[in-house]
Image (cartoon, helix red, strand yellow):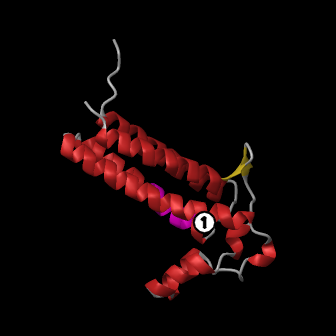
Amino acid sequence: MAMVLTSRRVFGFIALACALLMGYALFAEHVQGYQPCMLCMVQRVFVCLVGLTALIGFLHGPGRVGSRMYGMLGALFSLGGAYIAGRHVYLQQLPPEELEGCAPSFSYAMENYDSLKFLKTIFIRDQDCGVIDWTFLGLSMPGWVLACFAGFFVISLWAGFRRA
């Protein structure tokens, strides 16, 4: 019996992939001891947004209009995450002397900065984000996350706009 690839199943796959990404991120942080920088934390937020959107799409089992909405929303969150991951990869390619001073920890910035200063801290102060301390097949963790966001973007649009 052939398995029919419905939008609902595709959204379920995306949600599972996002859960696995978050699981590995937490494993790398809490078991392997890697400390995530600000951009890593923002990428995690976007992974969760893509995963939550896909999970809702999976649980809802939408029709054509709903699939398009979930597909567009997942693609939009994927674009946001790809931008952050792309910036992170770019910063990792710069020589250390071209990066600005060290950024405060994510938790410190959340507790002590207003929204505008927090965003400026994420996008301007990038010293910790230029360090590459993990690679697999030649790509850093942000490189892999960027590739995943690109895949989520394409798959979300395909799931939302494919012909049944």
Instruction: Quickly name the residue at label 1.
Output: 87
Q: Is residue 131 left or right of residue 86?
A: right
The residue that appears at 52% across and 66% down in the rendered structure is 42
The residue that appears at 38% across and 57% down in the rendered structure is 76
Whether residue 39 appears in magenta in the rendering, the answer is: no
Answer above or below: position of 110 versus 4. below
Q: Secondary structure at mark 1?
A: helix
Q: Quadrant of residue 96?
A: bottom right
Q: Amino acid at mark 1?
A: Arg
Over which residues does the magenta segment extend?
A: 40-47
Residue 41 screen position, x and y as percent: 55, 66
Q: Quadrant of residue 62?
A: top left
Task: Label the magenta part by its dominant secondary structure.
Answer: helix
Residue 146 screen position, x and y as percent: 57, 53
The residue that appears at 36% across and 45% down in the rendered structure is 157
The quadrant of the rendering that contains the C terminus is top left
